[in-house]
Image (spheres, grey):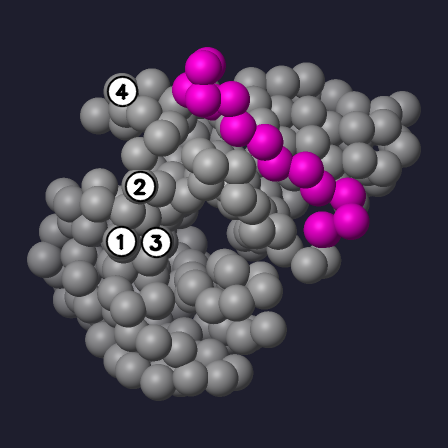
Amino acid sequence: QVQLQESGPGLVKPSGTLSLTCAVSGGSISSSNWWSWVRQPPGKGLEWIGEIYHSGSTNYNPSLKSRVTISVDKSKNQFSLKLSSVTAADTAVYYCARDGGITGTTYAFDIWGQGTMVTVSS
Amino acid sequence: EIVLTQSPGTLSLSPGERATLSCRASQSVSSSYLAWYQQKPGQAPRLLIYGASSRATGIPDRFSGSGSGTDFTLTISRLEPEDFAVYYCQQYGSSPQWTFGQGTKVEIK
């Protein structure tokens, strides 16, 4: 079955760039799915960051769009998140997720990574 | 942007009781685009319901979803100890494509 695993630095300096990767195993990133990033500040709710299709098409949350870049590497079966000009407000657990289900037609995130905590601090 | 408002913020119930969670949208949402998730401390969210009323794979039938338009409900018919968690609704729309409610915590009374 498909599994997702986030990786990247757990500590980023203010004004720097947060970079995370989500490795897809047990399936192909070129399936009929979009692939999303979601974050959750400590003790708070979920915020969708953006998504990518294997073709490279992307959609971003307007609240973060100016600072976000999501890319895909089909050769490595993974996708990545870059968030620039970070502040303490970007401290959160970052999740990657698959949306679309097995057929790509389910409007929900059926598979999630375990999440990775990123702290923005000097 | 469609805003999802969940109520109540916290629900205090005992095992065996029925839980009714509400998710209200600021504009009409297609039932196909409404999902519910469960999240326990230190864990990723888990998909419970998609398409407003379809249970995801492996979800017990004590979980059910209903609703249409702007009002949706997640019902847990009889709470089991493992059901005490935070629940989020989510909708698919346009710009942003995905939004979540703020969550309802179901705690042990």
CB within 8 Å, label 4 to label 3? no
- B59 or B41: nearer the viewer: B59
Relative height, residue A6 to residue A60 (above, below): above
Q: Residues within 10 Å of mark 4 (few under 14, many from 20)?
A: few
Give the numbered dot on residue A32.
Answer: 2
Assign a secondary structure to mark 3: strand
Give the numbered dot on residue A108.
Answer: 3
Give the numbered dot on residue A26.
Answer: 4
Calculate the distance from the C-alpha at mark 1 to the C-alpha at mark 2.
8 Å
Earlier in the chain: of badge 3 and badge 2, it is 2
Q: Which residues are magenta?
A: A64-78
Q: Position of residue A114 (x, y in %)?
A: 44, 29
Marks 1 and 4 share the same chain? yes
Marks 1 and 3 share the same chain? yes
The answer to whether residue B34 is left or right of residue A7 is left
**Circle 1 is placed at which residue position?**
A105
Earlier in the chain: of badge 1 and badge 2, it is 2
